[in-house]
Amino acid sequence: MRFGLTILGSNGAVPSASRYASGHLLHSESTDVLVDCGEGTQLRLQAAGASVGRISLILISHLHGDHYFGLPGLLTSLALSGRTAPLRILSPPGLRDRLAPLLELDRYGMPFPLEFIEHAADDMTLVAEVGELEVYAFPLRHRIVTNGYLLREKPRPATILKDMIEAHSIPYAAIPTIKQGSGYTTAEGRFIPHGELTAPAPPPRSYAYCSDTLYFPELSNYVQGVDLLYHEATFLHDMAVEAAEKGHATAHQAALVARNADVGQLILGHFSARYRNVDEHEREARAVFPASTAARDLYRFTVPFTERNSE
């Protein structure tokens, strides 16, 4: 049951030889989701060995070029590869109008259904379901309308215990309702509560994407308890004033969000090109939230599947 993340690009504003522009690929059991698509994203997908055919949904955080300029090339490559499966692209308003003229100039049409969904988040909102994932959008604070995204596995049903099936001669037809929360009454009239018949389901795994945004304490409420939190850290904290003026955050501030939200792991990214080395971002964040990692292109992060507890 896979649930993991590949960093396709970790630079802000412009790509460099070692860090491409923003892009993440979330891997789930049945599908992959691309989050932002900066310049060169399809090259990074190739370098990561990713199967682009598994991507069924693309999420664009906002309409600054370093977060979507890779889309025309990726869509054209998908068309040339003979893709026929539908593809959805979700973004703040305006993306389709920006891409349409360029796509119309291309000699190859889209041989697959392409749906643009526009949403400007003003609260935590369920915006899509794909495979076993629920996708939520929430507002960030940048210079233009910007969505943050939370992707979480759908809740799994409880597991009915084999020994309880045998002990109480539970018929197969009764199992689905028990897994959904019901108890069971035996032939002798004894009621067995749901909690005795089942093992709890593993908790849903989750990942949140917060780029670009200035620091605001309320952000922790949107990403409370997620397993993986990606939060931009364009600057180190000695440039906090400039960060706020430009609608960005520092590594220290990203760590504050992670700590206050009690997340499992913080991933820093969207680094300014002024920083050739991002080790100091990692040190600055770890002073506040030890489980912090500065993203490097093609790094992979995995959230293990928690086995069901049958005790």
Image (spheres, helix red, strand yellow):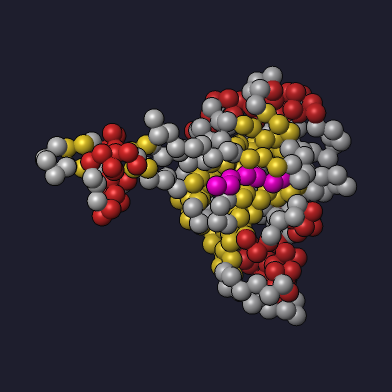
Residue located at (80% from left, 28% from top): 279
Q: Is residue 298 among what the camera can see?
A: yes
In the picture, the quarter occupied by the C terminus is: top left
Q: Residue at x 87, y 36 (%)?
A: 276
Q: Residue 63: where, in percent of width, then height?
A: 66, 54
Residue 169, quarter of the rendered image: top left
Q: Which residues are magenta?
A: 1-7
- Does residue 103 appear anywhere in the picture? no
Q: Position of residue 65 (x, y in %)?
A: 73, 54
Q: Residue at x 48, y 56 (%)?
A: 129
Instruction: Answer above or below: position of 231 versus 287.
Output: below
Relative side of 291 to 219, left or right: right
Q: Is residue 73 left or right of residue 98?
A: right
In this rendered view, identify the residue nearer to me: 145 or 78. 78
Q: Does residue 219 sit above or below 260 in this rendering?
A: below
Q: Quadrant of residue 42?
A: bottom right
Residue 79 within the magenta-colored segment of the rendering: no
Is 4 one of the magenta-colored residues? yes
Front residue of 136/228: it is 228
Report the residue at 58% width, 38% height from top: 304
208 vs 159, nearest the viewer: 159
What is the x, y in percent for residue 32?
Answer: 61, 55
